[in-house]
Image (cartoon, rainbow, N blue to C red):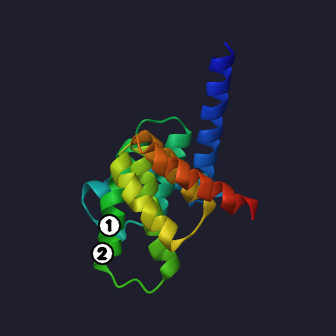
Amino acid sequence: MKYFVATLFLLVCFFAKAQECDPLDSNKFSLYKKHIKRYTKLINKQKYKKVDPIITYGIATYLRLSNDTNCNYWYRTIVPLCKYIYSGYDLQDKGLKTKLIAYIAMSYYYLKDYKNAELWLNKVVKCRFDACYLYILSLTQKQLGENEDADATLKQYNEMIKK
């Protein structure tokens, strides 16, 4: 029973920490809810130039936090959309570039594609050295069975949050 309670506590802590990493303003959820129909039509017609990746990621996160399984459709949409924008344009705005990389990384993470999540999370850590992404990276490495790397990343995370 103690083991079960301890495991449940750790899972809740991990989930709560993953929520903090979302590069998203959760106060705008009503905005995201309003865009679902319109964005679904645009995405189905493959009119990516009219689709804002921030709103698309917001819709995915809104649906995930609402326990709606359609969030996977939106996270799968985010990846090619952000890659299209990331590779197709000369991005002068480093903040936007970093957000796009974070959207891709977190989308892969929530889709449980840990191999790609690890690849993109490493890019996020290089662009935006933020402790929460180190934490998610360590969880991803654990999922992949890379325990030594995960421990080293977690140690780096712990050192960073102490500062």
Few, some or many C-alpha atoms within 10 Å of disc 2 (few <14, some 14-19, many ≥20)?
few
Of all residues shown, which one is farthest toward the front?
A: 148
Marker count (numbered): 2
Q: Nearer the viewer, residue 150 or 54?
A: 150
Residue sitting at 63 percent across and 18 percent down?
4
Question: Pointers 2 and 1 in contact (CB under 8 A)?
Answer: yes
Residue 49 falls in which quadrant of the image? bottom left
**What is the x, y in percent for residue 51?**
38, 65
- Label at residue 87: 2
Badge 1 amino acid: Lys
Q: CA distance from mark 2 to mark 1?
A: 6 Å
Residue at image mark 1: 83
For the residue pair 107 and 160, the one nearer the viewer reads as: 160
Q: Residues within 10 Å of mark 1 (few under 14, many from 20)?
A: some
Quadrant of the image containing the C terminus = bottom right
**Tag 2: residue type?**
Ser
For label 2, the SS is helix
